Amino acid sequence: MFLQKYAAVIFFIFSFCIVGQLFAQDNLQDPIHKFNEKEFIVSLQKLKPKEFARLFARQYSQDSTKSKLSVAYIKNMMISSEDLETQFWGYNSLAKWERNKMNLEPSIAYLDSTYTIAKTLNNDDLIMSSLINKGVYYYDFGFYKKAMEYYLEVLKIAKKADNRARQLAVMQNIALLKLEVNDRKGAIKLLEESLKIVENEKTLNFNYIHVNIYIALSKANIGIENYEKAASYCYKGIELSEKFNDKGASVYFYNFLGEIANSNGNYEEANNYLDKAVEITKRDENTLIQLPLIKLNKAKMHYFQKNYNVAIEILLDIESREKLNGTDIIYLEEVYVLLAKSYKEINDTENSLKYYEKASEIYKENDKIQESLSAEIIKKYDLETLKEELDQSQEDSKRTKYVLYISAFLTIGIIVSLIFFYKNREKNNQRKFAEILKNLEREKNEIAEKINTTEPASIVIEVKEKAETNIAQEVKEVEILDETKERLLKKLQNFETKELFLSKNSSLNEVAKKLKTNTSYLSKLVNAHKGKSFTAYITDLRVNYAIRRLKEDKKFRSYTIDSIAREIGFNRSESFSRAFKNKTGLYPSYYVKNLDNQNVE
């Protein structure tokens, strides 16, 4: 027993010594692997200011220790330097640092300092760098008009200096602004022209611009629902951005692919792409500015899958973070609409109404921004471009005076033509608006007469089309027995009266099931008695309903166009706007605005 106790004590002492030795070795090895702050600061001092700014943006800001030391180095060494160019790149780095933290005001203040220094140095390249960064930062935070002003200023300097890289960068940014005012075709045209230049360039390095053009083209094609083309640009963009380690660009492309998968109903695929985007933002602080948009697509995915509470949680997180940052981001309208719809689905009426009202307020503000920006682009960019082309023609011509007169005449003529065009368009729009109201009143009286005489006719408001007569006689190929036909017509009348066409489940197959008939009979019946395809029939019913309800329901007019579209069965606001325009000649936003202006009740 004594020997056993003695052996146990010896074993304990031996073990303690071994552990102590291992611990001591760890302590000795730790300083070797520890990050050496002094060496890092010395390495910063060896870098040229521009190279430091590049590394700070791409590497140092991703590491909390390095970023802290780098910011201290900028404040203590760079911006206090006697060398103005060193000061410039110091302030430039601080501006990016604040922007990545979603602090617009201090980032712009730092860019003001870079601009002052660049002007003192009389360095066009540094001046353009300051101005284009201002434009980009204002764009990121939703201040599009300000962004446009800075882009145009850079474009003027770049053309004068024949700096093609800067010209392409600005053209791409202006294309993004065109997207924000729904001029998608104009944006795509501008971007495709830029892409051709970049792809044919052999001497200059346009990799950064090349990737950004892919970003803009992906976004533009998503806007016009050309998902296949958008996805192809995303794949090309991912390949190029990974080749040059541009993680910020990869975030855009994965987010876009998630949005495309959402729209196509491929939710598992959407989740995978969005998770990839989120993972990059975790590793690279420079990409955090994209996180709210990724979360918005995540929320949409959960909404479509009927996970309403999860969608609400994500959307509230987006809202709280934007409030914290004190920014007024244009996509908050979409956040509020989705919140309202999600609350509605879980029968929380109070919160649903609250967020519909918030969405309505932002919609009005965004509408003003888009209108002012649209006019700004026409007045400044399109006319400036035309004027410069005419000026160039003047310089190249031998008969300078003759070209000058022609240029001046054409410029004035185009400005007058634009003014005339907008006035004439407004006049035509007012005429169309008056015609809609007149037809509504006439149809209202006709409906009253039909009710009084109990005619079993379909009560459908038609805005642009004349009454269709003798259609049944003209379509001889319909072979449905009279009794069956009458029964189906009554069911179809009931379908219209109960406004069942407002359901999103109003495909030919779904409606045929509801009416207890087959798709062939129903399609032929609609073709014969309505004079249109089944899809056109449903679309017309929805648009007619919107025309009538918008006139009669002031609360309904306060909804966003997206909310109105989804309320009446459309999946996307673009589809509704296009159908409304085809039917009436006006966009729904114009119709709503004029109803409000005339205080129609």
Image (cartoon, rainbow, N blue to C red):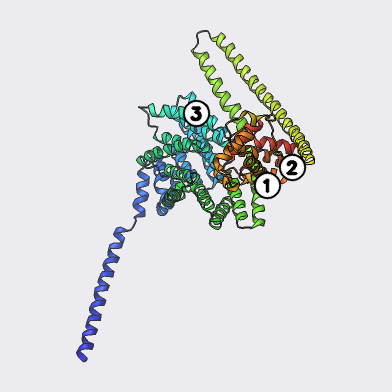
Badge nearest the viewer, 2 or 1: 1
User: Which of disc 3 and disc 1 is earlier in sequence?
Assistant: 3
Check if mark 3's residue and mark 2's residue have beta carbons within 8 Å: no
Q: Going 73% across and 39% down the picture, which residue do you hit?
A: 596
Q: Secondary structure at mark 3?
A: helix
Q: Residues within 10 Å of mark 1 (few under 14, many from 20)?
A: few
Name the residue beneath numbered marker 3: 190
Q: Is residue 13 above or below residue 353?
A: below
Question: In the image, 44: left or right of 487?
Answer: left
Q: Is residue 428 above or below residue 361?
A: above
Considering depth in this image, is 532 or 491 the residue closer to the camera?
491
Name the residue beneath numbered marker 2: 552
Considering depth in this image, is 528 or 344 the residue closer to the camera?
528
At which x and y percent is residue 359?
A: 64, 47
Q: Going 55% across and 57% down the picture, which residue do you hit?
A: 313
Q: Secondary structure at mark 2?
A: helix
Q: Going 33% across and 58% down the picture, which residue do you hit?
A: 34
Name the residue beneath numbered marker 1: 498
Q: Kindly give the residue lying farthest to the left in the view shown.
A: 3
User: Which of disc 2 and disc 3 is earlier in sequence?
Assistant: 3
Q: Amino acid at mark 2?
A: Glu
Q: Amino acid at mark 3?
A: Leu
The answer to which quarter of the image holds residue 6 is bottom left
Badge nearest the viewer, 1 or 3: 1
Marks counted in the figure total: 3
Question: In the image, 155: left or right of 409?
Answer: left
How much space separates mark 1 and mark 3, taking CA atoms?
A: 47 Å
At which x and y percent is residue 361?
A: 66, 45
Q: Quadrant of the N terminus?
A: bottom left
